Image: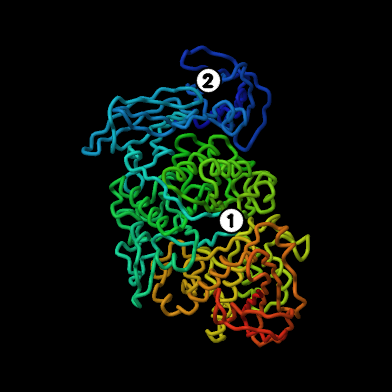
Amino acid sequence: MNSNERNFLAYIDEMDIITILLALSYHHGLSSTFSITDESNKVKSIQIIKQQQIEKYNKYICRLSEEISFGHPYWIFDEHGGKTDLQIGAVIRTEVFDERFFYDGNDLGVSCKDNQTQFKIWAPTATQVKIKLRNPNSSFSEIIKMKRKEKGVWSSVVNSDLELYQYTFLVLVNQEWQESVDPYAVAVTANGERGVIVKLEKIHREKPVLPPFENPVDAIIYETHIRDFTIHPNSGAEHKGLYLGAGELNTTGKDGEPTGLSYVKDLGITHIEFLPFNDFAGVDELDPAIEYNWGYNPLHFNVPEGSYSTNPSDPYARILELKQLIDSIHSQGIRVMMDVVYNHVFVRETSSFEKVVPGYYFRHNELGFPSNGTGVGNDIASERKMVKKFIIDSIRFWLKEYHIDGFRFDLMGILDVETMREVRKTCDSIQKGTLIIGEGWNLNTPLPIEKKAIIRNQSKFPDIFQFNDKFRDTIKGNTFNLYDKGYVLGNEHYHEGAMDVITGSIGLIKKDSRLFNEPTQSVNYVECHDNHTLWDKLVYCLPDLDHLYHIKYHRLATGLVLLSQGIPFLHSGQEFFRTKRGDGNSYKSPNHINQLDWDRKDLYLENVNYIKGLIQIRKELPCFRFKSAEEIRSNTHILPLPKPIIGFSLQNKSHEFHEVLLLINPLRSKQTIQIPEGNWTLIANGQKAGIYLIQNLSNNELVLEPVCLTILAKK
């Protein structure tokens, strides 16, 4: 850029408004006239409607007599003969631009069939687009020009079968060429450097019939990470840390007992939710053992991650192996949930979005800088039509091509309500019962609060379910304050809050404490991949306490996750007291921190069996998964017990156990209480749980063991 260009800048900020900046060092920043010309060299004058000084520039707001035609270069002249190119400015973030260039076709990306390969890319602000095509068997590359079509789509058809050819797009915007991977790519080379043309119809699989899934509260979600799941030396898996390893059946630990997928099946889980497995940055796919990453660094949204594949250099391998994993999980009657990260990209400047349509896909603040509600330097502008379309297209792709059964939306509060409604509608049109959960945190992104997909707006998208941080912090204590003790640790201040969250956060105790309208909206959890594990928090909180009490507290907290109204969510290994050795943010920590320690499962098998028993109770007794707020209100009675003990009588009208008592003692001492008269069957206490007789009780006085829950049932 020469000195004249630096002193003279012009941007189109609305369809008929141009902003011109003249440096004060250049003719004192003064020009009484400006004109515009295009490739035809026909010169038109521009009307100056406002002028003001901003720092080292004079800023001129100018109006065009007619709108420019996007896709062609323009130049601006001043009265001194100075010349600069007209750059794309804030116009792309206007509603008019969005309406003008919205493309509703379903053919973006590449399709290859009948000895013909079609390329399409949406790049409305580009003045030229080319395809850079590479033969997979040589270093030879070919450049193919694309033609601009309607709505800013560029297209090209090559009359040959280009399967396995590698490709990128060369895009010219603002007089600058950028080389980009196709945002709609479905296959890539190792480390995602280039797109690859594949024929997915060759490897399409039919989805098997899964067990009925009638209501969201029937789900029991188990969150894990593909590498963590089997990387432990004693996982029993052959393909440790890979898609194939996570799908292996009949693996056993050193005690000969089940590990991996067979273990999860035996535990009683209905949904496995994997941390992101779309292509992400942070791990070298050609040498994955060196680095670790959770996967919240999205590169290519419609491509499986290569570091989990046996051969990341083979574009088909990762696709086939992920499909094999999903098939294997489905064969066990378990559904697969995918953690999706549509709220940001790894690096904005180098993302395909920014290279193809600079400035469009991301939110900007009032100063024009990229907003940062995500904390990683960029926020996806989901409210824009083609951004929303991309998200919907991507969800549709994963549902249809990979038979995904549910989605967890990372930092869902960055996204807008309307987009999430469209996600729900799309899922319902393809597969009823698709489970959609998300983090509805209110983050600092420039979107009006009434449009944010946050807990506060849950009534606007009631069929998408939210992580209940109130449940988490009430039961165990504040997740960001290691030393805060929650209800299960005996903190009486959380007593009323605990009653509220256990009954679905619907305001049963006090209407003004209502978080959700329906229990289905509440995803109940006390630990997940983020922050410290519950075990590590307990060890920090209560360092001088015997491990026996750490076990009791942990067992009680996990038990309440499984027995509260709403959707229970377990972090993998939580049932055998998962530890990350005190690491509270292990997103790139090594395997020995993040791995699922299968030896620990053997060590704490008694607790695993206890949790398995509670899962069995939840599945068997409808009173632990009421489907509506009305059902909870009609069938839940609070027992008059001294603080901080909690007791509920739950009506089970359709079950032989027509009344069930849930009793909770968070104190470290035995507590004697009065219970309703009748012949009660004890089905859970501090040591055992399951749908079987532990003990018959006919006395209306009961001694509650320290730090435990008790379940009594009456026929």
The residue pinned by badge 2 equals 69
Quarter holding residue 204: top left
Quarter holding residue 130: top left
What quarter of the picture does the N terminus occupy?
A: top left
- The answer to whether residue 481 is left or right of residue 285 is right
Q: Position of residue 192 (x, y in %)?
A: 36, 46
Question: Amino acid under label 1?
Answer: Pro
The circle on residue 81 is none
Question: Amino acid under label 2?
Answer: Ser
Mark 1 vs 2, N-terminal side: 2
Residue at figure coordinates x 57%, y 83% from the top left: 549
Residue at figure coordinates x 52%, y 76% from the top left: 610
Q: Are marks 1 and 2 in contact (CB under 8 Å)?
A: no
Quarter holding residue 469: bottom right
Other-residue count near label 1 (Cα within 10 Å), few / some / many at <14 / 14–19 / ≥20: many
The residue pinned by badge 1 equals 216
